[in-house]
Image (cartoon, rainbow, N blue to C red):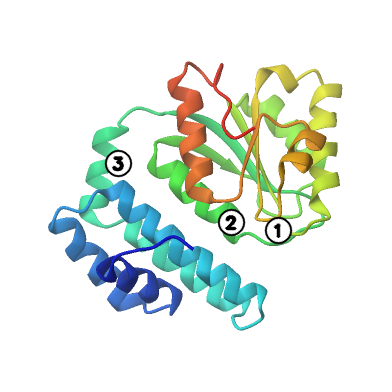
């Protein structure tokens, strides 16, 4: 686990413990004291990852995941946070279709990525959870996104992610988008099997990767940890 300062660890703990009031107050004070908003996002993301682990170990329930997402969203909506992102990304960065693939109803990782992408200025079309491959294809045809993001917590989603990629190939849409896949269980072997352009096991890394693709020129030419 990454080492954080005592001050940083305090904010992470507030998020991990679902202490809404203190998390928001601490984040707001840190912003006024000059913390880098992007670094603050990393701290929030670390707290969310710990919440996810507590959920996986059955110490937390779905309501706790929802509360953690609410805290994350409220921090993103703090005055200095929104001023930073709106000032830095005042034009739409790009368009992305995102969803948790069929067979999986988990949404915390997807939602964290969505929040970060929206902060970076992306126009996000969120398809929700348990999304069939044909719905991904239909929305790529309809919205013409720069990027498609596939999320899945269960290891069984590897096969479904591959089927989504195959469906985009069959629809002759694969070469029109970048595809990023996200899940804690993903490996290089799974990534190569699925046939995406990159993968991330961390929402913060995934969001930055999508931004780098767009900065490289309409999603072309940059591949992350793939």
**Residue 130 quadrant:** bottom right
Residue 109 marker: 2
- The answer to the question of whether label 2 and label 3 lie on touching residues, with beta carbons closer than 8 A, is no
Residue picked out by circle 3? 85
Reply above or below: 4 against 180: below
Q: Is residue 88 left or right of 109 when viewed as pictured?
A: left
Reply above or below: 163 against 73: above
Count neighbours of disc 3 (C-alpha within 10 A) and say few if under 14, some if 14 to 19, many if 20 or more.
some
Foreground mark, 1 or 3, reads: 1
**Residue 140 quadrant:** top right
Residue picked out by circle 1? 153
Q: Residue at x 39, y 54 (%)?
A: 42
Q: Residue at x 53, y 39 (%)?
A: 124
Secondary structure, mark 3, is: helix
Secondary structure, mark 2, is: helix
Count neighbours of disc 1 (C-alpha within 10 A) and say few if under 14, some if 14 to 19, many if 20 or more.
many
> Which of 160 and 200 lies nearest the eye of the viewer?
200
Return the x and y of residue 80 as percentages of the image width and height.
20, 51
- The answer to the question of whether label 1 and label 3 lie on touching residues, with beta carbons closer than 8 A, is no
Q: CA distance from mark 2 to mark 3?
A: 21 Å
């Amino acid at each position: 686990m990454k080492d954080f300062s005592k001050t940083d660890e305090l904010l992470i703990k507030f998020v991990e413990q679902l202490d809404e009031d203190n998390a928001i107050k601490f984040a707001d004070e840190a912003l006024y004291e000059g913390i880098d908003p992007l670094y603050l996002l990393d701290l929030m993301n670390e707290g969310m990852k710990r919440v996810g682990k507590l959920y996986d170990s059955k110490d937390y329930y779905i309501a706790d995941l929802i509360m953690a997402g609410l805290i994350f969203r409220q921090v993103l909506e703090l005055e200095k946070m929104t001023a930073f992102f709106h000032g830095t990304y005042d034009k739409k960065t790009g368009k992305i279709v995102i969803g948790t693939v069929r067979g999986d109803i988990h949404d915390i990782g997807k939602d964290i990525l969505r929040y970060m992408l929206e902060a970076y200025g992306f126009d996000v079309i969120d398809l929700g959870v348990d999304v069939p491959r044909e719905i991904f294809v239909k929305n790529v045809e309809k919205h013409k996104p720069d990027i498609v993001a596939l999320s899945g917590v269960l290891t069984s989603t590897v096969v479904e992610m591959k089927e989504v990629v195959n469906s985009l190939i069959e629809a002759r849409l694969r070469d029109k988008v970048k595809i990023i896949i996200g899940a804690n269980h993903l490996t290089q072997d799974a990534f190569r099997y699925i046939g995406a352009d990159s993968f991330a096991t961390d929402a913060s890394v995934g969001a930055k990767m999508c931004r780098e693709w767009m900065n490289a020129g309409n999603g072309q030419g940059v591949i992350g940890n793939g």
